[in-house]
Image (cartoon, helix red, strand yellow):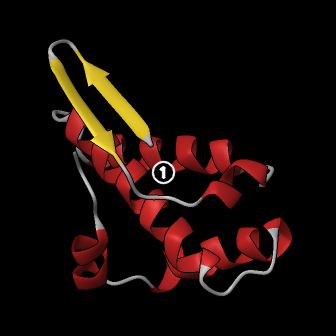
Amino acid sequence: TDIIVSGDRVIRLSNGHPLMARVTGMGCTATALTGAFVAVLPDAPFEATVSAMSLLGVAGELAAENSAGPGSLQVNVLDVLHTLNETEFIKRITIN
């Protein structure tokens, strides 16, 4: 679960996979995605952050479906980020 807070706004994201915590560089990937999304949406950094972290969580879930461990998950997350389409992404987002 990721919790994103800005002032009085709080979003809880439930996407992702436990194996993601065992992958070196996953935090760096989260930072890079967030920076890219905020660069595109500079007037909406909260929404950009929610979108970026949702994308990484969904990518982690999909990647885990074909991963035997953290090494293959790392590669598979990159592949999912490259191939994931908007329809599948929106269908899989879990925001509480």
The image quadrant that residue 27 belongs to is top right
Work out which quarter of the rendered image holds the N terminus and state it. Answer: top left
The image quadrant that residue 10 belongs to is top left
* Residue 80 percent location from the top left of the image: 53, 80
* Residue 3 percent location from the top left of the image: 37, 32
38 relative to 85, above or below: above
91 relative to 27, above or below: below
Q: Amino acid at mark 1?
A: Leu
Work out which quarter of the rendered image holds the C terminus and state it. Answer: top left
Closest to the observer: 52 or 95? 95
Q: Residue furthest top?
A: 7
Q: Residues within 10 Å of mark 1 (few under 14, many from 20)?
A: some
Closest to the observer: 69 or 46? 69
Please tell me whether mark 1 sits on a helix, a strand or a loop. helix
Left or right relative to 51: residue 18: right
The image quadrant that residue 44 belongs to is top left
18 relative to 77, above or below: above
* Residue 15 percent location from the top left of the image: 41, 58
Residue depicted at x 37% and y 51%? 14
Which residue was labeled with disc 1? 33
Residue depicted at x 30% and y 72%? 92
Residue depicted at x 55% and y 46%? 30
